[in-house]
Image (cartoon, rainbow, N blue to C red):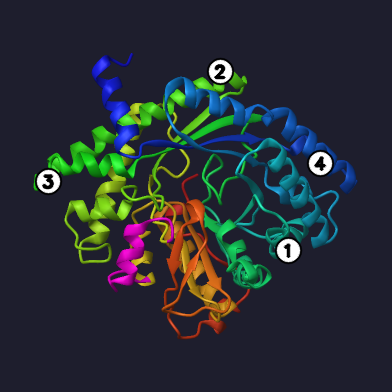
Amino acid sequence: MINLSEAIETNKMIQDENLDVRTITMGVSLLDCADSSLETCCANIYAKLLSCAGRLVKTGEAISRDFGIPIVNKRVSITPAAIVGASCCKRPEDYVEIARTLDRAACELGVNFLGGFSAVVAKGMTPADELLIRSIPEAMAATERICSSVNVGSTKTGIDMDAVRLMGEIVKATAERTKDADSLGCAKLVVLCNAPDDNPFMAGAFHGVSEGDAVINVGVSGPGVVKYALEQVRGADFETLCETIKKTAFKITRVGQLVAQEASKRLGVPFGIIDLSLAPTPAVGDSVADILKEIGLAHPGAPGTTAALALLNDQVKKGGVMASSYVGGLSGAFIPVSEDQGMIDAVEAGALTIEKLEAMTCVCSVGLDMIAIPGATSAATIAGIIADEAAIGMVNQKTTAVRIIPVIGKDVGESVEFGGLLGHAPVMPVNSFDCERFVARRGRIPAPIHSFKN
């Protein structure tokens, strides 16, 4: 039970410290929608989504009104579309038609994003997987609310370098196909290693084949709350610092647990997981970078940044695990550059580089996220960046990802405006030395020795 003082404290978090439920995401299995006819498959997909998720947005709005808790996004994730369309899709254009169907359903449902236009190819690509991957540039250009992801590796299987090389080309092609919108299609496309089945956060969300027919996952975010709590213990020792973060994460997660259970009950859909992620927004006071500065850094990127981020990530997870029996997804601290004003400031001050961001991803959630790079960057260089990040995830047994945006027509020193939660970003330099011969090799990077646990 929540007592009066806790209720007042939670209300203050919401009103003054940017606490919100970042997303209610309904995962929906589309395995029963598969058919040898593309037309029938698309009709099945549309009907299943409207049947399962038709009340999602209104229910989220009602919970927000009843409890006074802002719920920013209502989203849907689906079974990886490469699997759903395998029987009927014979060319990339067929998968684009599935993407259009998904987009129509998302618009009808009123959700802001639908994730799962995805392929899981950690050990190899089926013909269907490759067709979906090759359809991504056109699918991202032809839709408004669809997010795409490709998982190219895991600790158990190694890294599929054929898929990595192909994704370098696909990211570049997606940028070209959406260049009139500052290559926005790449902001809806992420390449992962060790992707979780239950991630509610876009662009990497999909409904894993190990999940039930439908499930409710909730993502909670509260960078502003953590920063405010740390301001009250400014200058204290590390033990006090850690305890403060942990206790704050506990309180934030309890808010998410309340929303998740209520949504599950009202929708008649099982509760899946709470993902407690300190996911920033462009709003002032809602920044992971500002937490790092409160811990004691002049800017993210300064010496000590990786240690401070490791501390933050660990205490967030410890507090969240104590607050809910079902913490999952990507829980921890996100560092998307364009979505965090403090990170943007650090880049513009010269404190933060892609190389330092890569080091930081060893200890935080996800990876190189929402980073704008010069549009002239080669597909091989992008593939090399993906390979580096996948290797960090594979060896460290964690989820890592790359959501990088080669902005066609722009170079270092310029900036790009994506709008909304996607924010804006300075174009960052990338290493100019070539890796073409490395990414041109065929086959897989084997799994590390510590993967053999059976």
Left or right: 221, with 164 as reference point: left
Give the mark, 1 or 2, whose residue is nearer the N terminus: 1
Callout in the foreground (3, 2):
3
- State the image coordinates of residue 209 (x, y, percent, origin top left): 65, 39
Residue 230: name its quadrant.
top left
- Classify mark 3: helix, strand or loop: loop
Tell me what residue is drawn at x 41 percent, y 61 percent: 337
Q: Is residue 261 above or below residue 394?
A: above
Would you say residue 166 is visible in this rendering? Answer: no
Instruction: Tell me the CA gap for discs 3 and 4.
Output: 56 Å
228 in the magenta segment: no
Q: Report the residue marked by disc 3.
A: 234
Tag shown at residue 138: 1
- The magenta segment is 338-353
Instruction: Tell me the CA gap for discs 1 and 2.
Output: 39 Å
Give the mark, 3 or 1, whose residue is nearer the N terminus: 1
Instruction: Tell me the CA gap for discs 2 and 4.
Output: 29 Å
Left or right: 175, with 99 as reference point: left
Residue 437: name its quadrant.
bottom right
Give the mark, 2 or 4, whose residue is nearer the N terminus: 4
Q: Report the residue marked by disc 4.
A: 34
- State the image coordinates of residue 22 (x, y, percent, origin top left): 46, 39
Callout in the foreground (3, 4):
3
Instruction: Tell me the CA gap for discs 3 and 2.
Output: 41 Å
Q: Report the residue marked by disc 2.
A: 265
Residue type indicated by callout 2: Lys
Tell me what residue is drawn at x 82 percent, y 44 percent: 42
Instruction: Tell me the CA gap for discs 3 and 1.
Output: 50 Å
